[in-house]
Amino acid sequence: MASKEIRRKIGSTKLMSSDMELMLKVGGRAYLIKDVLDKELLDAIRTVHAGGKSISAGISIELAEHATDELLTLAEVRVLYLIAEGKANKEIAGRISTSEATVKGQIRNILAKLGAQDRTHAVTIGLKTRNYPSRSFVSEMKLGRK
């Protein structure tokens, strides 16, 4: 039921911690692993119904491990994907309807956050660490490729 809808929208039920954080930031109220015990599921339903949030223990631990990571913004993620496609700054600016100076600023932020030396290095680090939401999630948020 719900997992089919998530799979349809996101492409997989295996998400990175940055995806989970983002889902919660944009209004998600709970995130449970599919092997959740009945009691934990009922507790989560009650918590969400009461206005709270519920996250499986294993997920909470993973999120805590990455709590100090500086995540890329959705705009920076979009720029990173366009860099990975080989787009020049001017092309990126046209694609996302912003100025080339804004794109250059976003690239500076990406390089700093990922500790990268150049654009190619940023893409490589991004692919290794997955310190950003998946392309399908960005697309679902209407911030992905046009």
Image: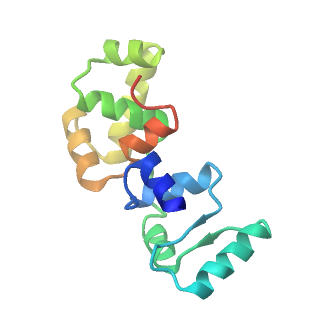
Q: Nearer the viewer, residue 3 or 110?
A: 3
Q: Is residue 11 above or below residue 120?
A: below
> Extreme front residue here?
1
Q: Left or right: 67 with respect to 14?
A: right
Residue at x 40% of width, y 60% of height: 13
Residue at x 50% of width, y 53% of height: 5
- Scheme of colours in the image: rainbow
Q: Is residue 75 above or below residue 35?
A: above
Residue 113, by quadrant, is top left
Q: Left or right: 39 with respect to 47?
A: left
Q: Nearer the viewer, residue 139 or 18?
A: 139
Residue 85, x across and y down, in percent:
24, 28
Residue 60, x across and y down, in percent:
51, 73
Residue 82, by quadrant, is top left
Q: Left or right: 51 with respect to 143?
A: right
Q: Is residue 143 above or below residue 45?
A: above
Residue at x 30% of width, y 46% of height: 115
Q: Nearer the viewer, residue 60 or 71?
A: 60
Residue 4, x across and y down, in percent:
47, 57
Residue at x 46% of width, y 46% of height: 9
| Numbered-mark total | 0
Q: Nearer the viewer, residue 145 or 17?
A: 145
Residue 69 in view here: no
Q: Left or right: 40 with respect to 123?
A: right
Check the picture and name the quadrant holding the C terminus.
top left
Residue 31, x across and y down, in percent:
55, 66
Residue 53 in view here: yes
Q: Is residue 108 above or below residue 33?
A: above
